[in-house]
Structures are given as C-alpha cells and as structure tokens.
Image (cartoon, coloured by chain):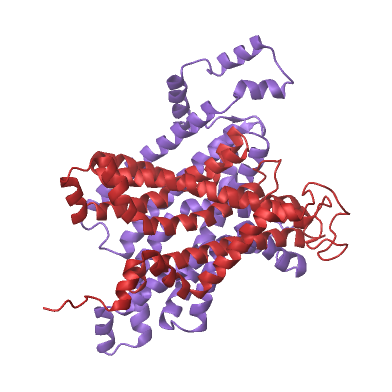
Chain colours: A purple, B red
Amino acid sequence: MSLLRTIVVRIAYATILLVAVLVLNFSLLHLAPGDVADTISQSMGGADQELLNEIRADYGLDQPFLVQLGRYIGNVLRFDLGHSFFYNQPVTKLILERMPATLLLVVCAQLLALFVGVILGVYSARHPNGPVSHFVTFFALFGYSAPVFWTGILLLIGFSLNVHWFPVAGMRDVTIEGGFWVHFIDIARHLVLPTITLASIFLALYSRLSRATMMEVLGSDYVRTAKAKGLSEREVVYKHALKNSLSPVITLAGLQFSAVISGAVLVETVFSWPGLGTLAFQSIIARDTPTILGILFFSALVVIVGNLLTDLALRLVDPRVGSKG
Amino acid sequence: MTDKPILPEEEMQKARHPFAEAWEMFRRNHAAVAALIVLILIVLGAIFGPILYATDPFDMVWAPFSPPGQEGFLLGTDYLGRDLMAMILSGARVSIVIGLAAALVSVFIGVSIGALAGFYRGWVEEVLMRITEFFQVLPTLLFSMVIVALFGASLPMITFAIGVVSWTAVARITRSEFLRIRELEYVTASRSSGANNLKLMFRIILPNALPPIIVQSALMVGSAILFEAGLSFLGLTDPNVVSWGQIIGSNRQYILDASFTVTIPGVAIFVTVLAISLVGDGLNDALNPKLRQR
C-alpha cells in the first residue's frame, strides 16, 4: 500500500516539475528578442507592420502573457509542442522520430558505465593497492578532466580512421540489406564508439564510488560474521557485500541522468548520431526556437522519468529505502 | 599546579597559524603542488602569452594544415592557415576568464540560496530546495544552449548561462553546512548577545562553512571551463574571440588532413581542468584535514 502511495506522490510531484519546465520554457520564449511573427516574415523576405500584426493576431501573440501561457500548457498536454518552421513539421513528430536513438545511446552508456564501473570498483576494493585500483584513480581523473567531445574525436581517429574497426558516423548503413540480425549488428557496430565515449565520463565516477562503499561494507560486522561462518571470499563479496554496496551507486546513477543527456548532445554531434542532440545542434544553428524548447521539455521529461525509475529500482535493491514512509 | 601546555609546543605553533597549517597539509600532496605549478604557468601564459607572441590569432599567416614544428609554427596552422600557437594562447584567456567568472556566478547563487535555506529552514528551505531540485532536473548543457541561442552569444551571456545552471551542488553543500553550524553553541551565544540575522549568517556562520564551499568552488572552475568548451565546440560562442572548444569544433571536419588541430586544443583543456581538479584535491586535504584522516 505504502509503495503505491509513494508512487502516486512521486508522479504528482514529477508533474509539477514538468509544468514548471513548461513555464520556464514559455517565459524564455517570451523574453527572447524576436517572435514567431518575425521568423515568419523573415522567411517570406520581410513584411510590413500591418502584416506582422495580422500574423501576431493569428498566432494569439497579441493576447496577455498568462492567456498565452495557459494556451501553451494546454497545447503541450495535447502533445502539441508547436510547429518547426525550419523542418516544416510538428515539433512533437520531429522529437519522437529522434527520441529512440538518444534513448538507445543514453541507456547503453549508463548500463555500460554502471556494469564496468561496479566490476572495477569491487575488484579494486578487494585489491586496494593493486594496478586496477591505481588505474581506477587515474581513469577517474581522466574522465573528469577530458572534454567528452574530444575523447570522442580521439576514439574516432583511433578506431575509425586509423584502423577501420568501427564506422565513422551515423546510426546505420543505408546500403546494407538483410534481415533483422544484419541490421541489429549494423546498429550495434555504430553504437560502440558513442557508447564508450559517453560512458567514459561516468564510468570513473561509479567505479570510485563503488570502490569506496565496497571497502566500507567489507569492513562491517556482518561481513566478518559471514567470513567467520566459513563462506568463501567470493561468496561473501558477491552475495553479501555487493547487494549492500549497490544502492549508493544506483542513487548516484539516478542523479546523473541530466548530465548524461548533456553529454549525449556533444557525443551525438561528434558521431552524427541521429538523436535529439544533433537535432538540438541543428535547430540552434537554424534558430528554430520551437524545436529547441521542445527538446528541452522532452529531455527534462526523460530525466524526471529516469529519476522515478531509479527510485523504484532502489526500492527493489534495498528494502530499507522508503520503509519509513 | 604548573602550567602544562595542552598540546606540545610545535602543535601550539601550528594552531596559531591556520594558513601555515593549511599550506603544510597542501604541500604534502605532491600531485597538488605539481598541478599548482602547472596552473600558474597556464595563467601566466594566458596573461603574457598573447603579448609576447604577437601573432593575431585571426590572421591567415600560412598555408592550412602546416604540421607542428615546421615552417616556423610551433603548433602548426589550422584549416584557414591561422597560427595554432597564437589561437591556443588567446583561447587560454577566454577559457580561464569564463571559467572563473561563471564559477563566481554559480558560487554567488549557490551560497545565497543554500545560506537562506539552511538558516531560515521551514517554508523558505522547502521552496528554495524545490527550486534547486528543479534546476537539477534540467539538462544543464541544453538549458544553457537555449539561453545562449535565444539571447545571443556574448561572453557575459555565456558566463551567465553556465553560472545559472551550475550552482545546485554549491547550494546543497552550503545548506547542509548551515544546518550543522547553526545549532552550534557559538552561534547560540552570538544570537543571545544580540547579533541580527544578517550578521549571524554572513559574519558568524558563513566563515565557518567556507572550507567545503571553497573546495567545491575550485572544482566549479574546472567544470565551467569544460562547459564553455562544450558550448563553443557546438559553435555557441562569441565569434570575435578564439576559444579552445571552438578551435576543436571548427577543425573537426578536417581530422583526416590534420588531426593535430583537434588534439592540441583538447590537450590544453584537459591539462588545465586536470590541474584545477588536482589543486582542488590538495585544497580538500588542506582545508578539511579531519575528513582526510577517516
């Protein structure tokens, strides 16, 4: 019962956050110099004041701020994020087309970073002065200090241009024909470098944290008990300690969603990955404001949903979370 | 009863000089000291480099893609035949100035919000922390891209756009420090001796909350430099100045012809941010010695 209640409360709260994002979006649009009428008149090669006023009346731009805001929120609730004048398509359609690619990249990168990060962290907690532990420390510094787009370009130079192991750009090779598996492998090949690049920022973070929590857990009483009753080192680490050291890492991963999306914008641009990031990049160059704001809204949505899911995952891993209500 | 000192003589000496003690702790971290030297060199290069090396970074001085060390160009030339050395030196100024200014903006916002929330508690804290959460949900890079795209890519606007999305960590740290310190006895003592809220906040509590805030601020400079590099890589930068990220962004189409035009500015960003984070590590040792001795 209490789980259901917390889920309802969390969803209500997430909705309030989303409305706040919408208000912010709209205020930005309102504050920015130039409006839709200016954009349209520019694309027509100029218009006189009378025509401008007519366009403004058509789009309701002459209405008071709050009325326009209400209408904007109402539209978004009906999945209408406006019209892109650059692509001449509804923004929602544009975004939904690009969304799967970004989700694929983001999810793969997070999973890779978590998986490898936890393995490295656990291993270096068991061998605190070994080479892996030093590697984690060094790699953490690299992951924090190297600009992600530069890491991406270096990987591109190394593995696509010097040795042709991976394709240079895009998500699929349009010349390839074949069944499901052929396309699956094709996309997977395109996915490797962008995923590694994006994961490189977070991998270090997760491995450092899981090393720290693992070392703490390994020093605790119940681990000593487990060892004392004769369990092997392996069993103690992977059955008892790992479960308890996971929840801080998952919490951290949940907090990283907005950073992952930000990183994805840069990584997608480097690898011409056809997701929201490249769309954002292109629409900013084209000064396509409705699309940019739509992307901001959608990525906030992704972050909020990601946070919700993290919360639920945390409850599954660690029953103590939320048991207080 | 003889006056026996509570601490040995040399410990007393140290205790009297907090800065000397901090420096002592900092010096023990060799990586941090090396990083500090590198950082000083970079800052000196940014200040004096463009004066001593008087080539205009926008001048097309030679054929494009001349490799480093040849034709008299230490770092070679870029896709327009501009001197990469001049561009790197000039870009250092932009990176460092924006990094410092944006970190300052975010520390100002973060400390104000965190201090108010931690000091007043109650509904003030509730509202301010909800605002903080709101800013944590916004994908930072996208949000600043939107600001720069809508309001123009001037250096002050870029600084503002970076600062306004990066303050949440500082706000959280400041708040938790305030929550801790406001319950301490010396705060109660000053309150009962008539100190008003402003004085309590900024003269009594803030100075004692500073160590973790300073460490975080140092790291903020590094992440602001990375942030600016990301924006200018995407082309969201003042076209009248050169910046490291922008050199990478504009040359990346030509990595087949000349990969050094992309790797060299990347190394500049990497080394600068690395040096800052190592110095931040050292500051952490110096300012939070108890934390270190866990």
In percent of the image, x 67 and y 65: which residue is there? Answer: A155
Q: Nearer the viewer, residue A162 or B165?
A: B165
Is residue A257 in view?
yes
In percent of the image, x 61 and y 47: which residue is there? Answer: B231
* Residue placed furthest toward the bottom: A230
* Residue placed furthest toward the top: A50
Residue A108, position as x, y percentages in the image: 53, 61
Snapshot quadrant of residue B134: top left
* Residue placed furthest toward the left: B1
Is residue A146 in view?
no
Snapshot quadrant of residue B240: top right
Position above or below: A110 against B118 = below
Residue B49, position as x, y percentages in the image: 71, 56
Residue A87, position as x, y percentages in the image: 67, 34
In percent of the image, x 67 and y 44: which residue is there? Answer: B235
Q: Is residue A43 left or right of residue B287?
A: right
In percent of the image, x 54 and y 37: which residue is there? Answer: A294
Q: Count of labels shown?
A: 0
Residue B32, position as x, y percentages in the image: 51, 69
Position above or below: A268 against A205 = above
